[in-house]
């Protein structure tokens, strides 16, 4: 056991977060995301019993967001014509705002299929049990100062 580490973060995930370097990307995927097929060249970590918000909040206690890009956090954009509501995005804004002085300004959106392409080159993908739609979120790592 270690002090100050959120209990939700497994040793495997802590190792991955530590291994990641500046500009590496991490996807926190919802339960519908094809994590295994998108993560063929990445490390896939299963966290099926957890929601994306609790995983995001725990990770951002340790994970610096990139300050050299406008949007170190990106969401999967809702497809045009899709009438899905995305209330989880408000929760993400609050969590990111608590971790980064840019607040919601640190969050961008990537078109769905472009998000998939970006996810294919991510360092790691965390497959959560999140049931909210369009709850996929990608983080770009910064430096510890």
Image (cartoon, rainbow, N blue to C red):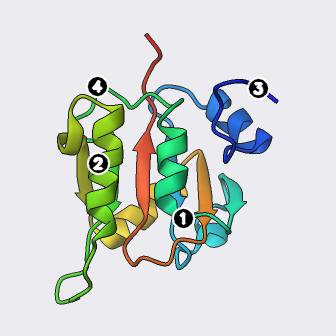
Give the residue displayed 26% in from the left and 85% down from the top. Answer: 84
- Give the percent coordinates (x, y) of residue 111: 27, 67
Reading the image, the residue beneath label 1 is 51
Q: Which one is in front in this view, the residue at disc 3 or the one at disc 4?
A: 3
Q: Quadrant of the C terminus?
A: top left
How far apart marks 3 and 2 lie (CA) works out to 27 Å
Mark 1 Cα within 10 Å, few/some/many (few <14, many 20+)? many
Q: Which residue is mark 2?
A: 94
Label whose residue precedes the other's in the sequence (1 or 4)? 1
Residue at point 61%, 49% (across, down)? 124
Q: Residue 127 has which mark?
A: none
Circle nearer the N terminus (3, 2): 3
Residue at figure coordinates x 27%, y 50% from the top left: 93
Q: Can you tell which quarter of the image residue 34 is in?
A: bottom right
Q: CA distance from mark 3 to mark 4?
A: 31 Å
Q: What percent of the width, then of the height, locates residue 105? A: 17, 42
- Where residue 112 sits, quadrant-wise, is bottom left
Question: Do tag 2 and tag 4 residues touch (Cβ < 8 Å)?
Answer: no
Residue in the foreground of this view, choosing between 7 and 27: 7
What percent of the width, then of the height, locates residue 122?
53, 49
Q: Which residue is mark 4?
A: 68
How many residues crowd around disc 3 within 10 Å: few (fewer than 14), some, or many (20 or more)?
few
- Pick whichever of labels 1 and 3 is earlier in the sequence: 3
Counting the numbered discs, the total is 4
Residue at the spot of label 3: 2
């Amino acid at each position: 056991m270690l002090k100050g580490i959120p209990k939700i973060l497994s040793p495997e995930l802590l190792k991955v977060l530590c291994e990641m370097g500046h500009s590496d990307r991490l996807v926190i995927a919802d339960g519908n995301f094809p994590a295994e097929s998108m993560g063929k060249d990445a490390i896939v970590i299963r966290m099926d019993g957890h929601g994306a918000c609790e995983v995001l909040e725990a990770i951002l206690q340790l994970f610096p967001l990139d300050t050299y890009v406008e949007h170190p956090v990106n969401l999967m954009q809702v497809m045009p014509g899709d009438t899905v509501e995305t209330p989880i995005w408000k929760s993400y804004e609050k969590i990111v705002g608590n971790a980064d002085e840019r607040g919601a300004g640190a969050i961008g959106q990537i078109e769905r299929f472009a998000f998939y392409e970006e996810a294919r080159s991510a360092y790691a993908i965390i497959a959560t049990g999140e049931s909210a739609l369009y709850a996929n979120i990608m983080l770009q790592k910064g430096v510890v100062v």
